[in-house]
């Protein structure tokens, strides 16, 4: 958990507390990916049914709620779960997941395939949704099973070391 920040010499020091105690890290850039809320204002004139917890289509919301599911535990879903009261209108891809952070491109491809089948009148193909995700990697919390990753945190240095001379260049 991030417990504080400190700025010195045009660098940012991030103070954190975790299972192994307190730590700090000096960084050049911090990307605060703390949440996402899709901008649905362009859809304000359409009849939508959105899940209030995740801003996703109402039928999809409980399937992707990050309090209960990770990307590996989301059931395959298609046209039926993505439909709205607005005839022929669907929200697909990352935006279909609303604020849930578990969207995968493979999921989006299957969503679009299912909707295309429904629009073409092939109900059987639209309802036959399949999603084959890898056993390890993107959905695995077991990092030791993913690409021989070390099980303990490792110090990573990006770029070149800072110059040791007081003069630059």
Image (tube, helix red, strand yellow):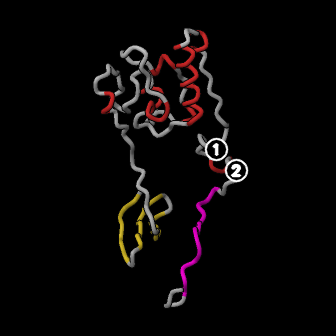
Could you say which quadrant of the image residue 161 lies in?
Answer: bottom right
Decide whether residue 154 is among the magenta residues.
yes
Tag 1's secondary structure?
loop
Q: Residues within 10 Å of mark 1 (few under 14, many from 20)?
A: some
Q: What residue is drawn where x is 62% and y is 27%?
A: 131
Span highlighted in magenta in the image: 151-164
Task: Tell me, for residue 137, which label it has, or none.
Answer: 1
Residue 135 appears left or right of 112:
right
Residue 33 appears left or right of 133:
left
Viewer-proximal residue, 87 or 16? 87
Tag 2's secondary structure?
loop
Q: What residue is drawn where x is 35% and y is 32%?
A: 53
Task: Tell me, for residue 147, which label it has, or none.
Answer: 2
Residue 45 appears left or right of 23:
left
Q: What residue is drawn where x is 64% and y is 56%?
A: 151
Residue 90: horizontal and vertical position, in percent?
44, 22
Viewer-proximal residue, 89 or 134? 89
Residue 58: horizontal and vertical position, in percent?
39, 23
Q: What residue is drawn where x is 34% and y is 33%?
A: 40
User: In the rendered structure, which disc, 2 or 1, sits on the residue that comes first in sequence?
Assistant: 1
Does residue 122 lie above or below 101 as drawn? above
Does residue 154 lie above or below 40 as drawn? below
Residue 119: horizontal and vertical position, in percent?
52, 14
> Do callouts 2 and 1 mark residues in contact (Cβ within 8 Å)?
yes
């Amino acid at each position: 958990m991030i417990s504080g920040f400190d700025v010195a010499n045009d660098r940012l020091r991030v103070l954190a507390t975790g299972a192994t105690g307190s730590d700090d890290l000096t960084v050049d850039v911090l990307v605060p990916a703390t949440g996402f809320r899709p901008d649905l204002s362009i859809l304000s004139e359409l009849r939508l049914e959105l899940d209030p917890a995740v801003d996703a289509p109402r039928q999809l919301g409980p399937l992707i709620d990050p309090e209960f599911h990770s990307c590996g535990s989301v059931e395959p879903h298609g046209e039926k779960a993505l439909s709205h009261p607005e005839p022929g209108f669907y929200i697909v891809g990352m935006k279909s997941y609303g604020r849930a952070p578990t969207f995968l491109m493979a999921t989006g491809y299957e969503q679009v395939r299912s909707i295309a089948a429904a629009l073409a009148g092939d109900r059987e193909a639209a309802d036959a949704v399949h999603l084959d995700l890898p056993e390890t990697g993107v959905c695995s919390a077991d990092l030791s099973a993913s690409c021989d990753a070390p099980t303990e945190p490792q110090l990573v240095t990006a770029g070149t070391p800072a110059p040791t001379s007081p003069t630059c260049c």
